[in-house]
Amino acid sequence: TTRVFSAFQATGRLTLGNYLGAILPAVRLQDEADCVYAVADLHALTVKHDPAALRTRTREVAALLLACGLDRSLLYLQSRVPAHTELSYLLESTAYEGEMRRMIQFKEKAAAQKEVRLSLLTYPALMAADILLHRADLVPVGDDQRQHLELTRDLALRFNHLYGETFVVPRAVHPRFAARVMDLAVPTAKMSKSSASDAGTIHLLDPPADVRRKIMRAVTDSGTEVRHDPAAKPGISNLLDLLAACSGRPAEPSSYGSYGALKKDVAEAVAETLAPIRERFGLLCADPAELDRLLETAATEAIERTSGLLAAARQAIGLA
Ligand code: AQP
């Protein structure tokens, strides 16, 4: 059977970008593959954080992933499975400093901070460990993770070449529509959990009125023609992509006589997509003890499932 793995950082509130780029494809893969998903709380330590907020956020992300439909997979908290950090060190010892520094996400995030944590630089090694630990064949991720996935493949191939066949070399799967959801207020930047402004970001738990307002106020260009052209019309193209992703079929730009009409349809489609998620999230929050139990069992299972691969990697690299 095909194995699937993906993880979601607990750095903030999950966005529509996270949902359409990775969560929805991950939900769909559950029908055809053996799926494992994690809340990446260790990855959330790569930037300035508040311990209490991280703890709350981690549980919220877990509940939200379940509410989105990731309830037929193994879903656990990354930090509860020490094999992630152990394998990460073996991969740091396989990777080169230069290739880590070349990562676009590192360059962008580092440029925006005065003090850059070392873990931000080594983040791709931990991400590679997450994936390789589960012998994943497929990794559903948004377009922004393309470069990290390439690095994961390079590290797996290098390790296998140097120390013998140990890892499965994984492949990224990107969604057909909306692999890169753009910020509604700045359509040339990707929508992001940690974006400074709220106006351009739709969070999965935003009340419907906020969702509609943000979409109706989305920045477009000065023309009037509705057409898919990301270079010339980034705002309109983003809205067309959102419509296609939420409705599951290509949008028809020519059927819109104005930007307003398009925005209205997008607002409806997004609100309809998010409504059942909000509802299920509410139900899950009503029983926090059940969530704890579920995560506890999942961590134990994840430890069992990954111990063989970790032992093989330790053996291959020469540890006693
Ligand atoms: N705008 C986006 N469009 C499509 N997919 C996206 N993803 C993120 N933003 C978009 C995908 O969501 C998954 C989880 O992302 P992550 O938690 O690993 O963090 P990220 O890629 O760094 O995304 P964010 O939201 O911008 O988080 P922060 O602000 O913490 O860096 C990934 O598969 C990602 O591709």
Image (spheres, rainbow, N blue to C red):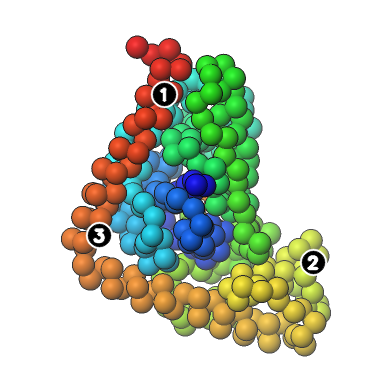
Q: Tell me the quadrant of the picture where the C terminus can be found.
A: top left
Which mark is first along the chain, 3 or 2? 2
Q: Quickly name the residue at label 1.
A: 312
**Element class at badge 1:** helix
Say what amino acid the circle numbered 3 marks. Answer: Leu
Picture coordinates of residue 204 (x, y %)?
45, 68
Q: Quickly name the residue at label 3.
A: 291
**How far is the residue under mark 2 from the one under mark 3?**
44 Å
Tell me what residue is drawn at x 68 percent, y 87 percent: 261
Tell me what residue is drawn at x 55 percent, y 52 percent: 140
Q: Quickly name the residue at label 2.
A: 229
**How far is the residue under mark 1 from the one under mark 3?**
32 Å
- Asked whether residue 130 is in view, the answer is no
Which mark is first along the chain, 1 or 2? 2
Determine whether 319 is above or below 174 in the image: above
Say what amino acid the circle numbered 2 marks. Answer: Asp
**How far is the residue under mark 2 from the one under mark 1?**
49 Å
Picture coordinates of residue 244 (x, y %)?
65, 72
- Asked whether residue 207 is in view, the answer is yes
